[in-house]
Image (cartoon, rainbow, N blue to C red):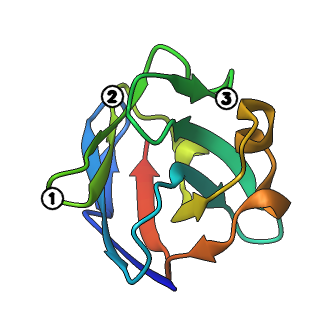
């Protein structure tokens, strides 16, 4: 079983920066790929970014590529999402998720994630 807790959400102005963190509590010793998803009111939960178990590979949605950076510190069991040049359309609840899926193609699919955090609100004002 894995428990995930997000933090770092808040309100910023357009063009600002924000860093989200995800703390993991794992009973199993196996490694997990980690992802960030977001969901705006009335919208489907969408992929934002993912990182491989070792942290050696990262993946981004086209909408955030070049602006967001995902990283992980396995020694601390944390995953971060640093967001730059924020836009109003980035406003959403952001969720941290974990998957034991083997193939990297699975990292983009929300149905492949086994565990989810409670979410943290990010609001970008104009």
Residue 56 quadrant: top left
Compared with residue 118, is residue 95 higher up or lower down, i.e. above or below? above
What is the distance, in whole Å, between disc 3 and disc 2 at their CAs?
Answer: 14 Å
Structural crowding at the residue carrying mark 3, measured as other residues with C-alpha within 10 Å and reported as few (<14), some (14–19) or many (≥20): some
What is the distance, in whole Å, between disc 1 and disc 3 at their CAs?
Answer: 26 Å
The mark nearer the N terminus, 1 or 2, is 1
Residue 85 is left or right of residue 99, and the answer is left
Residue name at image x 65 percent, y 26 percent = 63
Q: Which mark is residue 61?
A: 3
**Residue 125: x %, y % from top left:** 42, 49
Q: Residue 84 carries which label?
A: 2
Residue 44 is left or right of residue 98, and the answer is right
The residue identified by callout 1 is 76
Residue 112 visible within the image: yes
As helix, strand or loop, the secondary structure at mark 2 comes to loop
Residue name at image x 56 percent, y 38 percent = 49
Structural crowding at the residue carrying mark 1, measured as other residues with C-alpha within 10 Å and reported as few (<14), some (14–19) or many (≥20): few
As helix, strand or loop, the secondary structure at mark 1 comes to loop
Residue 93 visible within the image: no
For discs 1 and 2, the disc positioned in front in the rendered view: 1
């Amino acid at each position: 079983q894995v428990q995930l807790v997000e933090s770092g959400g808040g309100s910023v102005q357009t063009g600002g920066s924000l860093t989200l963190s995800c703390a993991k509590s794992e009973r199993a010793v196996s490694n997990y790929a980690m992802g960030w998803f977001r969901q705006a009111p009335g919208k489907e939960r969408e992929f934002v970014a993912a990182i491989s178990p070792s942290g050696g590979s990262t993946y981004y949605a086209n909408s955030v590529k070049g602006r967001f950076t995902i990283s992980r510190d396995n020694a601390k069991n944390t995953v971060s999402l640093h967001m730059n040049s924020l836009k109003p359309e980035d406003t959403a609840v952001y969720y941290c998720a974990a998957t034991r899926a083997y193939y990297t193609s699975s990292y983009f699919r929300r149905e492949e994630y086994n565990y989810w955090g409670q979410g943290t609100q990010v609001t970008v004002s104009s």
